[in-house]
Image (cartoon, rainbow, N blue to C red):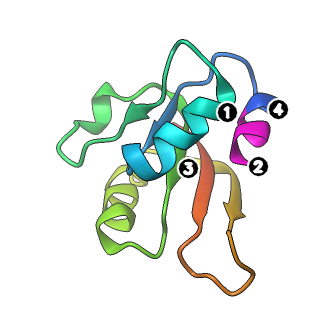
Amino acid sequence: SIAAEIARLEPGLPVYTTWPYGIGAPVQFYLGRNSGIRTLDPSMPVSSLPARLVLLYRPAVLRESAIVQRISVDFHTVLEKDFHAAISSKFGTRLAVLSR
């Protein structure tokens, strides 16, 4: 699961999502963290993001992919893993660890 994968990552790594209700809230429930999953708002300045973070988004959703494209200028992908509810579903969630 996404929550299990996040739990295996380095402790304290901030987690962001482009879809707070559909991705952030369920993952937060299973993580049980107090720190919370932050929303990556399209208008958020890239410079305000931490140097290393986890990003949860749906690559098949153009609005979310555009947000990722915008920040990918300043970040590189360290790890990327896709999670799908069905084998042939294109609307899965991608977990990406990004670093400056």
Residue closest to the eye, 89 or 96: 89
Q: Amino acid at mark 2?
A: Ser
Badge 2 vs badge 1, beta-carbon distance below 8 Å:
yes
Q: Is residue 21 left or right of residue 78?
A: left
Residue found at x 53% / y 75%:
91
Q: Which residue is mark 4?
A: 8
Is-magenta flag for residue 76? no
Q: Which residue is mark 1?
A: 30
Badge 2 vs badge 3, beta-carbon distance below 8 Å:
no
Earlier in the chain: of badge 4 and badge 1, it is 4
| SS at circle 4 | helix
Residue found at x 46% / y 37%:
16
Q: Give the percent coordinates (x, y) of residue 80.
A: 68, 56
> How far apart, in angstroms, are the residues tagged by discs 2 and 1?
9 Å
Earlier in the chain: of badge 3 and badge 4, it is 4
> How far apart, in angstroms, are the residues tagged by discs 2 and 3?
23 Å
Query: Quick one: label 1, few (<14), some, or many (20+) residues within 10 Å?
Result: few
> How far apart, in angstroms, are the residues tagged by discs 4 and 2?
11 Å
Q: Is residue 92 left or right of residue 42?
A: right
86 vs 42: above or below: below
Q: Amino acid at mark 3?
A: His
Region in magenta: 1-6
Q: Which residue is mark 2?
A: 1
Q: Give the percent coordinates (x, y) of residue 3.
A: 70, 38
Task: Say which of marks 4 and 2 sits in front.
Answer: 2
- Magenta span main SS: helix
For this orientation, the residue located farthest to the left is: 43
Query: Quick one: label 4, few (<14), some, or many (20+) residues within 10 Å?
Result: few
Earlier in the chain: of badge 2 and badge 1, it is 2
> How far apart, in angstroms, are the residues tagged by discs 3 and 4?
20 Å
Q: Which residue is mark 3?
A: 76
